[in-house]
């Protein structure tokens, strides 16, 4: 398997790379959600 950059990836690494990409997507989603929750938390604390 080769990518557009000319780097070659061992076939058994392709699945691992897919899993890493999926996990990174999940982390990004959770960080976005966490940011929203922190904003809500801060806004409520300001009302005290």
Image (spheres, grey):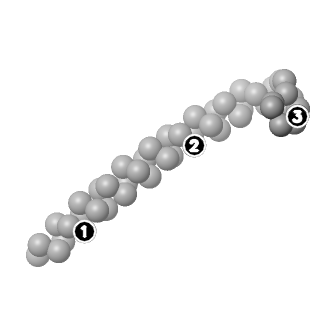
The disc, 1 or 2, on the residue closer to the chain's N-terminal end is: 2
Vertical position of residue 33 compared to residue 4: above or below:
below
Instruction: Report crowding for label 1: few under 14, some 14 to 19, many 20 or more residues within 10 A (C-alpha).
Output: few
Discs 1/3, front: 3
Discs 3/2, front: 3
- Looking at the rendered image, the quarter that the N terminus falls into is top right
* Residue 35 position in % (x across, y down): 37, 57
Vertical position of residue 22 compared to residue 31: above or below:
above
Marks 3 and 2, how far apart at CA: 23 Å
Q: Residue at x 64, y 33 (%)?
A: 19
Instruction: Report crowding for label 2: few under 14, some 14 to 19, many 20 or more residues within 10 A (C-alpha).
Output: few
Is there CB contact under 8 Å for labels 3 and 2? no
Task: Choose top left, top right, bottom left or bottom right for residue 7.
Answer: top right
Q: Is 29 left or right of 41, judged from the image as shown?
A: right
Is there CB contact under 8 Å for labels 1 and 2? no
Q: Residue at x 65, y 38 (%)?
A: 20
Marks 1 and 3, how far apart at CA: 47 Å
Q: Is 30 left or right of 45, judged from the image as shown?
A: right
Q: Is 19 left or right of 43, judged from the image as shown?
A: right
* Residue 5 position in % (x across, y down): 83, 37
* Residue 29 position in % (x across, y down): 44, 44
Marks 1 and 2, how far apart at CA: 27 Å
- Looking at the rendered image, the quarter that the C terminus falls into is bottom left
Q: Which mark is residue 24?
A: 2
The disc, 1 or 3, on the residue closer to the chain's N-terminal end is: 3
* Residue 25 position in % (x across, y down): 53, 40
Task: Choose top left, top right, bottom left or bottom right for residue 39.
Answer: bottom left
Residue ID for mark 3: 6
| Element marked by disc 1 | helix
Q: Which mark is residue 42?
A: 1
């Amino acid at each position: 398997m080769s990518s557009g950059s000319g780097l070659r990836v061992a076939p058994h690494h392709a699945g691992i790379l897919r899993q890493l990409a999926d996990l990174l997507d999940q982390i990004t989603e959770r960080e976005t959600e966490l940011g929203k929750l922190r904003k809500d938390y801060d806004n409520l604390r300001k009302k005290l």
